[in-house]
């Protein structure tokens, strides 16, 4: 059975955490992942701070296992959310899209384990220095806001740089990716895209169908000109966004206005003109099933591969 230091630190059975996907990761998905032995996460990007508080309370009713909250640090209400999670007694946080340094002392004093999501060695070292319990090293194959380095080169460099456990993310959605991550020295994996099609994931059916239909070349990164690159499925929306970015006569404010609310539209309304964030492994996601089946397939698949890894040796 795969077990790692991360399992002991977080009190979970399998070293797999669910991505804290904006608008997507709610109590229903987080509780299903936690009940199945992974670490479920609730996203702080939802209909405001009180909506996130409600998801936390709902999750407690659905599971007695550990779960966490992902805090998107660039959100206008990040400070409010940072205090709310302390009030609610949340014990595990992941953070994304910035440095959690301003909140670290408050969270550590509250006994919270903080796991920043980072995409470079320099940030991993900074996070270790300010007391992070682990880091999620997120390669550019991921969906949503992405860094520049891809998983295969990022994970070993971060593993070499820090002493705290490294959780690999970006392009991992089956036993093969998980086994590779463990071989690179990761202590855990984070999976986002595959959980979007989980039965317990409450996104629009249209979103799920788009992931299930995706191929290897179905995603695109937009937003580089705005300093906020985001990977999503190629749609009329994302292709129009890319065209606007390439057109010097279009002002950044117009592009920003075009993108505002697009993720919520995709997730909640299944509006084809929304932004369907997804990682490059969307093309490998072919089946909707319960979160438990997804976790068992990934962990079971990795175990089989790792058990036979020595077959390669003569
Ligand atoms: O945060 C993510 N992925 C996300 S956030 C998100 S919400 C959203 N995004 C765009 C439009 C609308 C909604 C969707 N996907 N991943 C974690 C991540 N964090 N990847 C890279 C980083 C990161 C980047 C810069 C972490 C730290 C950082 O620090 C800069 C600094 O301030 O030092």
Image (cartoon, rainbow, N blue to C red):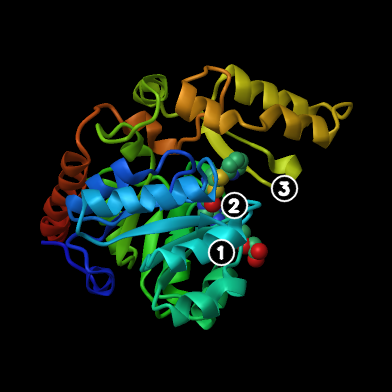
Nearer-N-terminus badge (1/2): 1
Q: Which mark is residue 148?
A: 2
Mark 1 highlights which residue?
Answer: 120
Callout 2: CB less than 8 Å from ligand 1 = no
**Compared with residue 281, is residue 126 higher up or lower down, i.e. above or below?**
below
Q: Is residue 176 left or right of residue 114?
A: left
Where is residue 267 shown, x and y percent of the image? 46, 29
Residue at image coords 67%, 32%:
260
Do labels 3 and 1 touch, CB within 8 Å? Answer: no
Residue at image coords 31%, 31%:
197
Q: For the residues marked 3 and 1, what is the alpha-carbon distance in whole angstroms?
A: 16 Å
Determine crowd level at label 3: few under 14, some 14-19, many 20+ residues with C-alpha closer than 10 A.
few
**Quarter of the image where one finds residue 171:** top left
**Compared with residue 157, is residue 202 higher up or lower down, i.e. above or below?**
above
Determine crowd level at label 1: few under 14, some 14-19, many 20+ residues with C-alpha closer than 10 A.
some
On-image quarter of the N terminus: bottom left
Mark 3 highlights which residue?
Answer: 227
State the SS at label 2: loop
- Number of marks: 3
Confirm whether residue 15 shows in the render. Answer: yes
On-image quarter of the C terminus: bottom left
Do labels 1 and 2 touch, CB within 8 Å? Answer: yes
Where is residue 10 shown, x and y percent of the image? 28, 69
Callout 1: CB less than 8 Å from ligand 1 = yes
Nearer-N-terminus badge (3/2): 2
Q: Nearer the viewer's eye, disc 3 or disc 1?
A: 3
Where is residue 167 shown, x and y percent of the image? 37, 62
């Amino acid at each position: 059975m795969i077990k790692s230091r991360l399992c002991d630190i977080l009190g979970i059975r399998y070293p797999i955490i669910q991505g804290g996907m904006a608008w997507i990761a709610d109590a229903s998905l987080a509780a299903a992942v936690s009940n199945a032995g992974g670490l479920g996460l609730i996203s702080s990007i939802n209909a405001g701070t009180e909506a996130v508080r409600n998801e936390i309370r709902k999750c407690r009713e659905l599971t007695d296992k550990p779960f966490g909250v992902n805090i998107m640090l660039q959100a206008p209400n990040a400070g409010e959310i940072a205090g709310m999670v302390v009030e609610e007694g949340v014990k595990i946080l992941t953070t994304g899209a910035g440095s959690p340094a301003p909140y670290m002392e408050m969270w550590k004093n509250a006994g919270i384990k903080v796991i920043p999501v980072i995409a470079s060695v320099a940030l991993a070292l900074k996070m270790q220095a300010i007391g992070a319990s682990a880091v999620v090293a997120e390669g550019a194959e991921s969906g949503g806001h992405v860094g520049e380095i891809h998983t295969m080169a990022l994970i070993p460099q971060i593993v070499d740089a820090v002493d705290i456990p490294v959780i690999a993310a970006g392009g991992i959605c089956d036993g093969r990716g998980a086994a590779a991550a463990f071989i690179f020295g990761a202590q855990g994996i984070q999976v986002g895209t595959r959980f979007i099609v989980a039965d317990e994931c409450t996104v629009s059916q249209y979103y799920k169908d788009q992931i299930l239909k995706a191929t290897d070349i179905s995603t695109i990164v937009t937003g580089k000109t705005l300093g906020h690159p985001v990977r999503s499925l190629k749609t009329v929306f994302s292709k129009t966004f890319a065209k606007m970015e390439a057109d010097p006569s279009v002002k950044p404010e117009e592009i920003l206005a075009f993108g505002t609310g697009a993720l919520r539209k995709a997730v909640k309304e299944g509006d084809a003109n929304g932004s369907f964030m997804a990682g490059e492994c969307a093309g490998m996601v072919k089946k909707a099933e319960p979160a438990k089946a997804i976790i068992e397939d990934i962990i079971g698949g990795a175990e089989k591969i790792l058990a036979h890894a020595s077959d390669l040796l003569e």
